[in-house]
Amino acid sequence: MYSDGTLQSRQAPAPRHIRPASVILSACFACFACALALAQSGRTPPPPSPPAPPQPGDTRPRQVNSKRRELPSAFIVVTAPPDGSQETSPFVSSGYPPTTDFEEIARGGCLVALRNQNGVKRVVGDLDVPRWEARETALGEDEAWVVWLELRWQQNVTMRETAPFKLRYLLFEPRTGKIISSGYGRGVRQTWGLPLPRTSIENQLRNAGRDIADQIVSELTKAP
């Protein structure tokens, strides 16, 4: 049998308590070692990404009104009386007969172009109509728009001009006589960098009348 002294000498030693301060120091040392290793390797952690910009309050797509109006069904195309500029213009040679009606040629180009538009049922013309009479005609109309053309010949042509004349138009609204649009017809299409094609005065007048018809159609059918 063993004595009490012997049993006491063989008992396991009591566990050693670890102080909290030692644990904290060990954790700090481990973090410092990691940071030192990253610094030595030349790699640094990426900076935080900037916050996304705030979205605008209204992100709905913009509504575009692409609906076009219908073209009126009736037109009256008239020309003003000649002002005598044809006789003094150096661009109208003596080879033209003095009875040549240049106003009629211009009016015909506009009139035919309007007749070829879809939905147009009536297009008539008249000549030697002053401006005030064209407005009076529009006041007495219920549905027909009045197109008044005025042909004036140039005495000199600048570099910006391509035709020896100016064909002006006014568009009168029916029942009110109000001028809705105005402008000039182009007898020759400008082509930058290329020489202008040679064409007769008659063709230039027809082209100017057609160009006026295109301007009128664009004005009357544009979206409200």
Image (cartoon, rainbow, N blue to C red):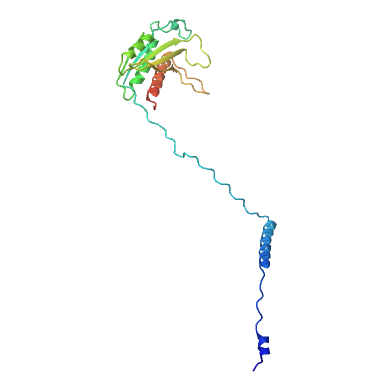
Q: Is residue 146 left or right of residue 40?
A: left
Identify the residue shown where x is 45% and y is 6%.
Answer: 85
Q: Quadrant of the N terminus?
A: bottom right
Left or right of 42 on screen, residue 155: left
In front of the other: 5 or 223:
5
Q: Locate residue 62: give its quadrant.
A: top left
Nearest the eye: 200 or 29 = 29
Q: Position of residue 4 (x, y in %)?
A: 66, 90
Q: Is residue 125 visible?
A: no
Instruction: Give the answer, above or below, for where 65 lies relative to 59.
Output: above
- Tell me where residue 136 appears, x and y as whole percent: 34, 11
Which residue is nearer to you in this view: 33 or 223? 33
Q: Residue at x 45, y 13 (%)?
A: 166
Looking at the image, how many numbered discs can be counted on the residues? 0
Q: Position of residue 164 (x, y in %)?
A: 47, 12
User: What percent of the width, then of the height, locates residue 35?
Assistant: 67, 58
Decide: is 216 above or below 89: below
Q: Spot the residue most to the bottom.
A: 1
Q: Is 18 or 156 nearer to us in this picture?
A: 18
Quick check: can you spot residue 212? yes
Which quadrant is the C terminus positioned in?
Answer: top left
Q: Residue furthest front?
A: 4
Q: Quadrant of residue 173?
A: top left
Q: Looking at the image, which residue is at 41% across and 11% down?
A: 150
